[in-house]
Amino acid sequence: MLTYLDHHATTPCDAAVLAAMAPWWREHFANPSSRQHRAGLEAAAAVEQARGRLAAALAMPPAAVVFTSGATEANNLALKGLAEAALERGDPRRGLVTLATEHRAVLDPLAWLARHGFPLTVLPVQADGLLDPGRLDDALGPDTLLVSVMAANNEIGVLQPLETIGALCRARGIHFHCDAAQAVGHVPLEPTGLGIDLLSLSGHKLYGPKGIGALVVGEGVRVAPQMHGGGQEDGRRAGTLAVPLIVGLGAAVQTALADREGRAERLAGLRERLWDGLESLGGICRNGNAGRCLPHNLNVTVSGVDGADLHRLLRRRLAVSSGSACSQGSPSHVLAALGRSRAEAAASIRFGLGRDTTGEDIATAVAAVAEAVAEMRRAA
């Protein structure tokens, strides 16, 4: 049986989430925009209840939550929507700042904006994957409109210094966007207290359904809609709302909050047991800062082996990856930013532990890596 340790790519839908969604597929199927009959009003009430749950989890007012199809759409709405809104109100600022280790769902929209008159600065990170706040401070100027830095990296799990970034942005009146897809439901996060103006998240990263996410918009921040045609979500995102998925997201957030602390402590212990077992094999190094990291993340590089052969051998027993699920097998740009060579990045393993991960799973993972490495080293 395959041991699944790729929870940064996606998580299984929690049983409580499935139960919460079930009635809204068929029994209560009405369109929440149909407010002239009871069925539509019931669907609308379910949407608002889920909105309230998500908002409460982030200590934000319900009106701040804009439902999207996921974090990728939320990132596009935040970045392109903020830039467009700035143009509309005559804001002369155009500068954009981000990190080399951001997800492609941030880097690609920013690159698109750069091709359309918004100069982009991509800052390097330190060898441990963390931003040097001094570099960010130096990069900010009177023309800077937006800084975008993710909360938790999807490959190496490092937790960026959001409060420091937020303070630097606030002092200059610069908008701060944060892709928090890997953080919400796993670590404490309150946008207002951290100075975050725009926060993106996705349901399937926290044991909710795929196809649903949200953009959380701070008070006084305007984003121009990137989808037009219906005026839903207070005119910020058109399209019929997916009631079952929204209900599922609300349930997932509530469930994640209930066991977050205990889950984090347990998975951090399993993660360290995994690292101890792998380190004992020799020739394996850890990627990213070990102290400021998601409790369920471990990313390692195995020296002196071919990455393709390594993952071919591991595939027999483990579901793991060498990087983001969106990279489609390309060498990790995140590990390249840490100074890893193309060959080293290919010979890296991202472990994402989850709610159902057991000590037996950890033992299986260590044994699988040990056997694969021993086989490859014998053949070398």
Image (cartoon, rainbow, N blue to C red):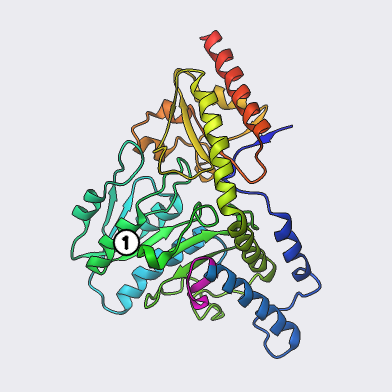
Q: Can the viewer see residue 114 in this picture?
A: no
Q: Which residue is mark 1?
A: 166
The single residue placed furthest to the right in the displayed view is: 27
The relative height of residue 129 versus residue 285 in the rendered view (above or below) is below
For the N terminus, the image quarter is: top right
The relative height of residue 331 versus residue 20 in the rendered view (above or below) is above
Query: Residue 275 vs residue 212: left or right?
Result: left
Q: Which quadrant holds residue 32? A: bottom right
Residue 110 in the image: x percent, y percent? 36, 57
Q: Residue at x 76, y 62 (%)?
A: 19
Residue 270 in the image: x percent, y percent? 58, 36
Q: Secondary structure at mark 1?
A: helix
Residue 177 in the image: x percent, y percent? 38, 62
Examine the structure image and report whether residue 60 is included in the region drawn in magenta: yes
The amino acid sitting under disc 1 is: Gly
Q: Which region is colored magenta?
A: 57-67
Q: Residue at x 63, y 49 (%)?
A: 11
The relative height of residue 191 versus residue 45 in the rendered view (above or below) is above
Query: Residue 266 vs residue 42: left or right?
Result: left
Query: Residue 25 vs residue 59: left or right?
Result: right
Front residue of 120/218: it is 218
